[in-house]
Structures are given as C-alpha cells and as structure tokens.
Amino acid sequence: MPLKNRVKDARVNLTNRRIQRRARRRLSAELAAFQTPAERAELDLILGRHDEAETEQIREILNQQDYERQRTRIVVGGYRA
C-alpha cells in the first residue's frame, strides 16, 4: 500500500476515533443526569426492554459512573464521608 494511502487511512481512523470519543462523552453527560434511585430504576426498566448488545455501551457508562460515585464517598483510611 502506498504511503499516501496509509497516511489517509490513519487520518480517517483518527477522525473516527475522535468522533466516537465525543459521542461517548456526550452520552455519558446525558446519563449522569440519572442520579436518584428512582431515576436509575426507571432507566433500568427502559434498558431492560432492549437486548444486551443494544444497551452494552450505556450499561458500561452507568456502571463506571456508579463506581466513581462510590469511590468518591470513601475517604483515605476506609472511612465514608
């Protein structure tokens, strides 16, 4: 493959990755609005209506957000804030 084509492919690949990261950050910000147990329960019910492959990215983001919320509640030494 000529160098010119490789450079073009690399640029396209980088552009696509940048677009995917922006979309994930946007989705993450929208999902962060669901914070209360009632809101999360409603969201879980909605997600339950779809198959796992369709909701995989959303569930990953929600799990990461839950983890971060729990992690920020723990203070050094293992005590909860």
Image (cartoon, rainbow, N blue to C red):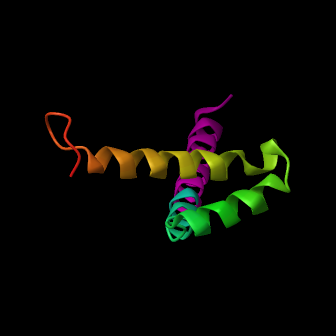
Q: Residue at x 77, y 62 (%)?
A: 46
Q: Quadrant of residue 34?
A: bottom right
Answer above or below: position of 38 versus 8.
below
Please give the range of residues in magenta: 1-23
- Residue 29: x and y in percent read 49, 67
User: How would you classify the magenta stretch by its main secondary structure?
Assistant: helix
The N terminus lies in quadrant: top right
Answer above or below: position of 70 versus 6.
below
Foreground residue, 1 or 59?
A: 59
- Residue 30: x and y in percent read 55, 70
- Number of marks in the image? 0
Query: Farthest residue in the left direction?
Result: 77
Q: Residue at x 55, y 63 (%)?
A: 37
- Residue 51: x and y in percent read 85, 47
Foreground residue, 25 or 8?
A: 25
Query: Farthest residue in the top direction?
Result: 1
Find out whether residue 4 is within the magenta segment. Answer: yes
- Residue 4: x and y in percent read 60, 40
Find out whether residue 70 is within the magenta segment. Answer: no
Answer above or below: position of 36 versus 9.
below
Foreground residue, 5 or 45?
A: 45
Q: Residue at x 53, y 54 (%)?
A: 21
Q: Say left or right for 33 vs 81.
A: right
Q: Say left or right for 68 vs 72.
A: right
Q: Say left or right for 81 vs 13.
A: left
